[in-house]
Image (tube, rainbow, N blue to C red):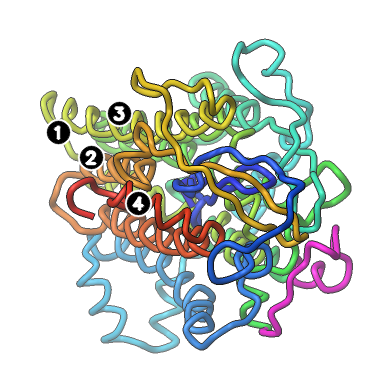
Amino acid sequence: MHSSDTIVNGNGKVNGHGLRWRQNDSHNNGFTKESNGVPRRNGKSHFGNTQWGRAWSVDFRTLLGCMFVLFGCPLFPMFFHISCTRHDCSLLHTFTAVFDNLNVTTFLSVIPQISVQTGIIYASWVAWQVILSLLPDVLHYVIPGYKGGWQKGAVTPAGNVDDYNINGLQAWLLTHLLWFLNAFKWRIFSPSIVFHNMGAFMIFANIFGYSLAVFSFVKGHLFPSCADDCKFSGSFIYDFTMGIEFNPRIGKIFDFKLFCNGRPGIVCWTIINLSFAWYQKETYGFVSDSMILLNMLQAIYVLDFFWNEAWYLKTIDICHDHFGFYLAWGDFVWLPFMYTLQGLYLAYYPVQLGTVKCALILLLGLVGYFIFRSTNYQKDRFRANPEGCVIWGKKAQYIKCSYVSADGRCHQSSLLTSGWWGVARHMNYTGDLMGSLAYCLCCGVGHILPYFYMIFMTVLLVHRIYRDEHRCQAKYGEHWQKYVAKVSYRLVPGLY
């Protein structure tokens, strides 16, 4: 969920928020315009029919992957929670304890306790984010350079162009304003309430995630927002996991995909971190420098997401992925409870890094962010003005190419080979991973648990690389081969 993949086709960009959520399909980095010439095919297959969004047919490996997402992934957040609350964050001790006493009684004893009160609190949180998502954005009127308000998305496979209410930055600011007012003035509830009820909130998040996945599956079958954008594979498990509807909506305002990707998970990310920091203050009498550093680094990432939310409309999550369990459950559960593992660890085990280590980790995080953002910025500048674009003091170099979309039209496009896009085919991922490593290093090297995030992001992004390049090969054919020959490294220049 946290990395962004942006690709360009005849309809514009495309991206992906992992479980997402999460940010760029690097190589499709050029601009595109439609041609009235005779359509022709590039590569082995017709891009529009085989590569847009999901699979048309499901093989055994894909089915196993879906089974793992459905029944394996939900165990991870609970496992890590139990590890921190009962086994001193030791994954080995947790694993041993769980499997040495694998029975119903033991299982029920370690499941977090829920209450009507925690259920009401969590439901209120979701309702608050829904309300905020429906409000008109006012920030784009007063903040220079911010692109909010009603924005058009990319063209869908069926040829539709949806409008989106971009107001995530406003929702984030209002939510955090209320948090700080409560923490320092109102004192209605403890600012560490999230930490103290993490387990219960996780249970309710699972309920919401699964319920939304079921609703979206039924909606896709019975009353889709756009039937022409639905996709059926013939496999119940695959369709439930990866989704049927492309852009499920209620009316023209509330878009499930944009809401779940941006809220409640990402808004909640920084609220959870602040709750961890407050718990440190309450318990130990201080907030460790590592906790402060972690809050800063991850807040930069979250604010970047909301500042560029309009750009996110052109990403894989919005432009390629259908809406099913993968996004619904992932955004409600995986993102807020797995992306905050570093803060959870530090809440239990404060780490004082000292000035030098803090400075080095901050530098790593900022350099990673710079690479991530400047890579995408170079692509956007090139797309806006390919002929006049200057990158690193030189006129942008690119490979001209073409492809055929599902409607049979031929499109002209370009693959940028200047700047970061000439260093490696996915330098935005490289920057993303540097930032991920910085988050983990805030926790020192005493435990492997905080580093799960780095491991997960590496697996996720490498998988995205191969998925994206498979799509680009099918889309661009021989032109893609020329690009690969010119930019030979995928992720790490000189190594991979």
Q: Which residues are magenta?
A: 215-235
Where 378 falls versus 478 (above or below)? above
Horizontal side of 135 relative to 456 (left or right) equals: right
- Whether residue 210 is visible, yes or no, is no
- Mark drawn on residue 341: 4
> Dot 1, how many residues are within 10 Å of its Cα: few (below 14), some (14-19), or many (20+)?
some
Q: CA distance from mark 2 to mark 1?
A: 8 Å
Dot label at residue 442: 2
Q: Position of residue 293 (x, y in %)?
A: 28, 30
Find disc 1 in the rendering and name its residue: 353
Dots 2 and 1: beta carbons under 8 Å? yes
Q: Which residue is mark 3?
A: 366
The image position of residue 23, as x and y in percent, is 49, 45
Q: Quadrant of the C terminus?
A: bottom left
| Distance from Cα at disc 3 to Cα at disc 2 | 14 Å
Q: CA distance from mark 4 to mark 1?
A: 18 Å
- Sequence-first tag of 3 and 1: 1
Chain-order first, disc 3 or disc 2: 3
